[in-house]
Amino acid sequence: MNQITIRTATLEDIEVLLTFEQGVIAAERPLTTSLKDTPINYYDVKAFIVDPDVEIVVAVIDGKLIGSGYIRIMNAKNHFRNRKFGYLGFMYVLADYRGMGVNKKIMDVLIHWGTEQGLTEFKLNVYQENETAIRAYEKIGFKKHMIEMRMDLTERQS
């Protein structure tokens, strides 16, 4: 097997990236009741590719796209020490390539890009039940920071 490389996504990658997006959604649907039952999209992939405040990357092996991720420069609220932070998302690796360190390689490239932009703080969201992802992110150096709580009155039992 050839080496896994990480490169900036291009407009030519959109079709594959849209399938990766649906892979993310399919993985997250069982973890939440918040998502609509109808087809949905999380990202405006084309806009991300051309936005100078976003770096979207793909992992490639033998010419095949096998994973993705992005970092977006975000403005922090006024009461936070860091005025900007890097928000990471769209982390996806095809099932056959999981456990090979692909996601870590993607995140390393994204965090490096963020530091080149002057960022020192990075955030991401992960569902509490997604213990595998949480462990992977903790290995990289992320720490649990805040828990988002939710109540949906339509889901209450009588």
Image: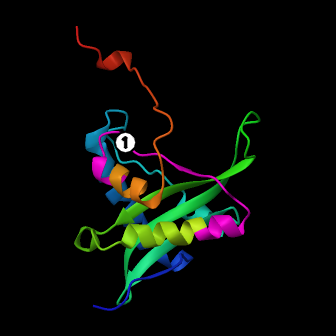
Left or right of 139 on screen, residue 110: right
Residue 155 % position (x, y): 30, 20
Residue 125: image location, x then y, percent: 47, 45
- Residue linked to disc 1: 127
Q: Where is 136 relative to 102, above or below?
A: above
Q: Residue furthest top?
A: 158
Quick check: is 114 in the magenta stretch? yes
Amino acid under disc 1: Tyr
Name the residue nearer the viewer: 154 or 96. Answer: 96
Q: In this picture, is 56 found above or below 73?
A: below
The answer to whether residue 106 shows anywhere in this view is yes
Color theme of the render: rainbow
Residue 10: image location, x then y, percent: 55, 77
Quick one: label 1, few (<14), some, or many (20+) residues within 10 Å?
few
Q: Looking at the image, can residue 56 be seen?
A: no
Q: Is residue 62 left or right of residue 81?
A: left
- The residue closer to the viewer here, 27 or 139, is 139
Report the residue at 30% width, 74% height from top: 100
In the rendered image of this protein, does residue 91 appear above or below residue 112? above
Q: Secondary structure at mark 1?
A: loop
Q: Position of residue 121 (x, y in %)?
A: 63, 53
Residues rendered magenta in the picture? 112-133
99 in the magenta segment: no
Task: Pick the quarter of the image with the C terminus.
Answer: top left
